[in-house]
Amino acid sequence: MDKLPFPNSIIISPKCHFTTLCFVNVRVSNGSLKKKKPKLLHCINLFSSTSVSSIHRFIRGRSVNKGFTGASFVVSKMGGIEGTTAMSDARTGNMIFESILEEGVIRFDCSADDRNAAFPSISFVDPKVRETPLMSIHKVPSYIPTFECVRGQQIVNIELPSGTSFYGTGEVSGQLERTGKRILTWNTDAWGYGPGTTSLYQSHPWVLAVLPSGETLGVLADTTHRCEVDLRQESNIRFISRQSYPVITFGPFPSPIDVLVSLSHAIGTVFMPPKWSLGYHQCRWSYVPDARVREIARTFREKKIPCDVIWMDIDYMNGFRCFTFDKERFPDPESLVEELHKSGFKAIWMLDPGIKNEKGYFAYDSGSEADVWVQTADGRPYVGDVWPGPCVFPDFTQLKARSWWANLVKDFISNGVDGIWNDMNEPAVFKTVTKTMPENNIHRGDPEFGGCQNHSYYHNVYGMLMARSTYEGMKLANGNKRPFVLTRAGFVGSQRYAATWTGDNLSTWEHLQMSIPMVLQLGLSGQPLTGPDIGGFAGNATPRMFGRWMGVGSLFPFCRAHSEADTNDHEPWSFGEECEEVCRLALERRYRLLPHIYTLFYLAHTRGTPVSAPIFFADPKDPELRKLENSFLLGPILIYASTQRDEELDTAHHKLPRGIWLSFDFDDSHPDLPALYLLGGSIIPVGPLYQHVGQADPSDDLTLLIALDENGKAEGLFFEDDGDGYEYSQGGYLLTTYVAELQSSVVTVQVAKTEGNWRRPKRRLHVRILLGKGAMLDAWGSDGEIIQLAMPSETDVSNLVSESEEKYRNRLESAKRIPDVETISGHKGVELSRTPVVLKSGDWELKAVPWIGGRILSMDHIPSGTQWLHSRVEINGYEEYSNREYRSAGCTEEYSVIERDLEQEGESESLRLEGDIGGGLFMERYISLPKDNSKVFRIDSGIVARGVGAGSGGFSRLVCLRVHPMFTLLHPTESYVSFTSLNGSKHELWPESGEQVFEGDLRPKGEWMLVDRCLGLGLVNRFNIDQVHKCMVHWGTGTVNLELWSEERPVSKDSPLKISHEYEVQKIA
């Protein structure tokens, strides 16, 4: 392809259609746009949905022959609307490379032209760094990726040694070690996600690869577009996204920490959080009215349960309008916050991106005047439904929009707002199949982000840019306070502006277990300030589940409990006295450890080190540690949690890494709390117990917990400052390095060095040497002075350890255990905590919940890594009804497991269920995974009469067996249903077709298929056409139902209603 004969790139007007007279914008050297005389161009509307699949991205400075006009165009990547790349032929080969940033960091591109065509980096703190080669480094990389560019897609493969373990990939559910998994980076409102959900709220196209030797390599696909991260092939990383994008590798370095530190040099470190934000947060959708907020605050203090923050969800607003307050529910927010502050609480308030499309509403009027809204393809403000109804959305890719939002935030802060919660910023949009705005919407972005582009380019960074705008607004309001922003959506680099949480999880044991790897994966992807909704957001936790979750959640970097509307109360005291006591003990642990946690965040902010990390960080060479998910490191503290319902502290097996690990507690061990160990060679600072961070004083007693290593030495850091503001960045802090050494049976503890301008406070220092099994040796002195302790004899140490063990056992035996009950009085909603039945064989793994309608929660296709069902525990997924009405009898009753076989003749796995639906009728379901065909699973369902009275002639009421599976659409705009009818007509149904019913000869000829063109897969549903009276397709928001209905009639013992069908996944050409 030839170069353009002129230096500037053409930008086609959004109003161009075929053979249209239009103005052409030309971007000149200073980046501005000038109008030129109209030219007659044969061009297509780049903003139409059809154009995205029919036109390829124009590469800057190159002409691309489209074939249908004979004309050649170029659209600047900085100023035009990008589509997909056109290439005359597929290209393959090794990627070219150059060193950037620092030694060990390599940028790879498919070619020099691809390097020039790549969009600017939004993930890097300084995008210029990615574009600047280090000419002094010429080292050949250890691993060189290969590429394939075809049909506008760039496929990158990196082969690593056998035995490599994969981590990272950002916010992902499921297992910690990611081999065998595949995700799609597309920020998605994923309420009630499961372990197989492939797209959650944030996007991190980043993989941390731990090699068999323990050396570690980090790999970043630096693209904002939808990106497939495929780790299904062992020891192989595969990225697939729209070309052209660079791949950046970090390492291999000796350890995973080295990789994370190097990554932080590129994407930045976490913002320095105010110390109060590291306390406990209590949240609910919603605490209303303001009297309820006061009641919650008062109860925490009365019950002496530590807490620092109370959150206000969306119901504080006037009609869900951002920056407003409901005059009846929250008539005086300033007075409310003043009262909370007096009690030691901070207040955090929610702000969503959707601004109600309503003239007279100040936010809408000022935004319209400033022209800050995201636009549709034809240049009008985009309007989409969210909580307030029709809304417009700020275009945070523009400086003027970010400044407009920041000034609104600045004014909002004057109400006493201490922190801001950015929710729904994927952005989520209601009443649309994609659950977000159209991909051909227009963002008039700043040149440093990529300029004017469609939404498919900016979608994944929308939430991060909103969080940035909110952060900057809080700094405008008060430059002497550190902002605290929590964001749901994010991208690589979001940690510079906001904390995050793991979204709308479920109150299930499975989600409790998943919360540990989810927090760790975000930390391994550069976002350390994160945690789950403790207790689960959706559904009702049981007392034991909530207590266990609080036990481990109190030690996560971000610690917040949150619950959904119409569920039972989820405060620590809501589950009975036993659970309340466990929650109190758990939070008291956190507050004692806050000096250590705050120090870890200072190190994360200044050095890029992790706050929490998987246990294998203690010994990356040990393969047995790499898949452990019930433990994690908090600096040198090892935490072992009991995340299984029947597993208590004293019954769980604790695999310890190499080295010395000494157990400790605060005389608070409990069967439902995690075990704590301190690494030999470590010193951690511990504070006294507070009810909130504001009670702390620098002159308070300081405790050092010390675990000596095999050489009798230990070292640790303690950071302290005002806990807020930026004086620390000007030297207003004290960072102390404490050391301990055993020589001649005497342990000497002293200050080795200090940093910062703060003078050491006058305070007592309590030194505690761990001896093992919780035993400690104590001494007191003054901080800054040398303290010496005489070590007891070996016999005395042995006796101390034995006494400590005895006290520990007595404490566990006398502890009031949390009752193991499924429900407690007063619960609203549905109990979600029981363990699903798992069927796994061949290509499929299924999970069913017999106690709620026998529904199937997940259909995981193992070879493709695809979870097909859209499900919550108590609704959706695969359901069956006994009547034509939606959710009629059969979908909520408790089913009995009649038969559960791991090895049946002809089947590998099978499950037989039945449920009593009243009137002498039972619904039966037999799920089987056949041995003779590992690619399918079968369901045989029926409605049978067993106790129908003789007075009715043995016949039941009218019934209809209605099979109602709800499938998730991973790519809604690229998914459709295909089948051939009995009469030979062919059908291709797309989401915009709505609901359709097929009866008679229009019914599918025994099978139909849900096709996902992006995945290249089709889910085939075959059925006995003689049993199916009609078929229905219903498209929802990101979902589709493919329903099978029997005839409607009475049934008897001899004439049941039955439907037999099966599912199989096939590859689509």
Image (cartoon, rainbow, N blue to C red):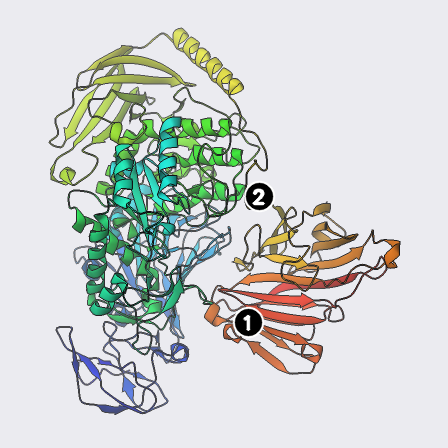
Crowding around mark 2 (Cα neighbors within 10 Å: few <14, some 14 to 19, many 20+) is many
Q: Residue at x 55, y 71 (%)?
A: 1068
Q: Can you say whether 662 is above or below 85 in the image?
A: above
Q: Amino acid at mark 1?
A: Ile
Pick the front one: 1055 or 635 = 1055
Crowding around mark 1 (Cα neighbors within 10 Å: few <14, some 14 to 19, many 20+) is few
- Residue 204 quadrant: bottom left
Specify the farthest residue to the front.
328
- Residue 672, labelled with which disc? none
Residue 140 in sight = no
Can you give x and y, in whole percent of width and height, for residue 79 in the image?
23, 74
Which mark is in front, 2 or 1? 2
Q: Is residue 296 left or right of residue 644?
A: left
Residue beneath disc 2: 831
Residue beneath disc 1: 1068
Q: Can you say whether 1060 is above or below 836 in the image?
A: below
Distance in Å between CA atoms under marks 2 and 1? 40 Å
Pick the front one: 584 or 60 = 584
Q: Residue at x 53, y 25 (%)?
A: 817
Element carrying mark 1: loop
Where does the N terminus fall, quadrant-wise? bottom left
Can you give x and y, in whole percent of width and height, for residue 333 in the image?
28, 45
Pick the front one: 294 or 859 = 294
Q: Is residue 187 left or right of residue 651?
A: left
